Amino acid sequence: MNFDLEDYLSARRAIVDRALERYLTKRPGVSESLWRAMRYGLFPGGKRIRPILTLAAGELFAAKQKELLPFACAVEMIHAYSLIHDDLPALDDDDLRRGLPTAHHVFGEGMALLAGDALLTEAFHLICGPATRSLQADLTLALIRELGRAAGADGLVGGQARDLEMEKTRVDIAMVESMHERKTGALILASLKIGARAGGARAADLKKITRYGQALGLAFQIADDILDVAGAGAALESGRKEAKKATYPAVAGVARANHRLRELRDRAVLSLSGYGGKAEPLRAMAVYVAQRALRGAATSQMQIQEMNG
Ligand code: IPE
Ligand code: IPE
Ligand code: MG
Ligand code: MG
């Protein structure tokens, strides 16, 4: 198979970035600080994995890119809001995001909070508007509902609440996985299902995409937590909240986290058997998500041993 994931990701990232610029034009009278804080959360941005998943799932079912882009960008706006809020002192109290000072350090807590609120709200404003007019109204409504559920109490926000509660209690792996499914998995799954549904995927296809998305969503957070282990020493020293987090490697150990990650990667890849070369971008993305962390695994293990003396 001659598929180059790096090329694929950078081309899709450029498409998403251009669309975000297009959708997020400043309207007269909007507070300059609010506007700058909103843009700070979105640009230059990160990997753009979620909107790319929307595009890739849509492409699998021959959806039109023009119809996918507003949803893909709405998903990324929700992701950006969730990170601004996640970094606030009331939650993870983080100083850095993507190597830069977190939004509340640059704009103040109040403005960071509001920028998150605005990005979340603008996401829904976007997909309720003219950008999605070429899709059938009942389908658009169903996709908006799908995104609303994934972002809300049953999904991302509910998962963040569990994450917060779990700092104070003993937890087992099942609890950690269920929290991950919400805080990270729900939006990833919705990104995929929205793309597939916009392309008219049938129930049997949606089932496969769902199996893929559930495995990928959980894998994504476990990978993120394995990668974070490398920074855990610093967090422990400064007493920051990250040190108290219920994560898969913290509860089960890095070796089991790696094992689970490989298992989920394989499940994600397997759920797309039957689609042939058309599903290669999605398969390759699952492998990429896992490999990012598995490559760093040897280092993390060494650092944990060092931390344990
Ligand atoms: C980070 O998400 C937060 C998690 C849910 C693990 P990403 O790793 O997608 O963040 P960016 O947007 O690429 O920086
Ligand atoms: C972020 O989870 C998940 C959401 C924002 C919903 P984390 O707190 O584990 O992610 P990072 O490590 O800050 O990116
Ligand atoms: Mg967090
Ligand atoms: Mg965090």
Image: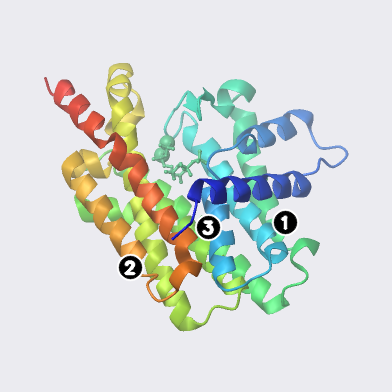
What is the x, y in percent for residue 221?
36, 47
Whole-angstrom CA distance, mark 3 to mark 2, is 17 Å
Q: Nearer the viewer, residue 130 or 178?
A: 130
Residue at 67 percent across and 71 percent down: it is 140
Graded by Cα atoms within 10 Å as few (under 14), some (14 to 19) or many (20 or more), the crowding at tag 3 reads many
Graded by Cα atoms within 10 Å as few (under 14), some (14 to 19) or many (20 or more), the crowding at tag 2 reads some
Residue at 61 percent across and 40 percent down: it is 116
**Which residue is tagged 2?**
270
| Residue furthest to the left | 309
> Can you tell which mark lies on residue 125?
1
Judged from the image, the secondary structure of the residue bearing numbered disc 3 is: helix
Q: Nearer the viewer, residue 265 or 111?
A: 265
Q: Is residue 133 above or below residue 46?
A: below
Query: Of discs 1 and 2, which sits in the foreground?
Result: 2
Labels 1 & 2 near each other (Cβ < 8 A): no
Q: Nearer the viewer, residue 135 or 263?
A: 263
